[in-house]
Amino acid sequence: MLKLGNDETDRFRVPDATWVFERAGQRIELQRQETDTGALLMMSGAGAPRSYQFDDVLALVRFQSDMEELLLKTGWSFNEFLPDRRSVADRRTWPRLTERRRWWTDGLLRQYNPRRSRKKQTPVG
């Protein structure tokens, strides 16, 4: 098991992040935040907001994984992760010039004509 030291360089960095779950018009947000004393998991949306303080980041991750599994098993659906860390816009919405998804390889396929040097195999028997 990984052991963390007291040195600042031995600590994991917990990125501030939000996981959003939805069910029947309801919404639950799980938010991670790094604090001076460790890491904090905040839960808001359904009922009163709650927060859970952890000295150990690994314990927070274990707890959050169990919480997410419980939500999924009880009908909640994962909907969103914030912040969106992709560097470019979603390409799935871009229009295509043609329906061919690999049109740029068509020219290569016409130029490449490998010789077949396989010998015909005769049945053994």
Image (cartoon, rainbow, N blue to C red):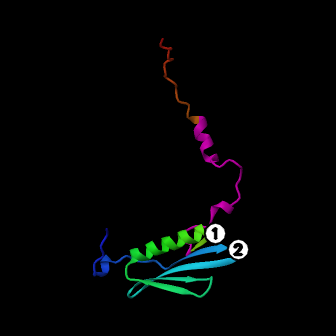
In the image, 119 versus 35, the foreground residue is 35
In the image, 86 versus 79, the foreground residue is 79
Residue drawn at 49 percent across, 71 percent down: 66
Residue 87 on the magenta span: yes
Which quadrant: the N terminus? bottom left
Hey, which residue is sitting farthest top in the picture? 125
Q: Which mark is residue 24?
A: 2
Left or right of 96 on screen, residue 44: left
Magenta-drawn segment = 82-110
Measured as percent of width and height from the top left, residue 96 is found at 70, 55
Callout 2 amino acid = Ala
Q: Residues within 10 Å of mark 1 (few under 14, many from 20)?
A: few
Residue drawn at 59 percent across, 38 percent down: 109
In the image, 2 versus 100, the foreground residue is 2
In the image, 125 versus 48, the foreground residue is 48
First reached walking from the N terminus: tag 1 or tag 2: 2
* Secondary structure found at label 2: loop
Callout 1 amino acid = Gly
Residue drawn at 61 percent across, 67 percent down: 89
Q: Which mark is residue 75?
A: 1
Tell me, yes or no, if residue 87 can be seen here: yes
Measured as percent of width and height from the top left, residue 100 is found at 68, 47
Measured as percent of width and height from the top left, residue 104 is found at 61, 47
- Residue contact between numbered discs 1 and 2, judged by CB atoms under 8 Å: yes
- Picture quadrant where residue 80 is located: bottom right
Q: Which mark is residue 44?
A: none
Left or right of 4 on screen, residue 51: right
Q: CA distance from mark 1 to mark 2?
A: 9 Å
Measured as percent of width and height from the top left, residue 46 is found at 62, 82
Q: Residues within 10 Å of mark 2 (few under 14, many from 20)?
A: few
Relative height, residue 110 to residue 7 (above, below):
above
Relative height, residue 116 to residue 76 (above, below):
above
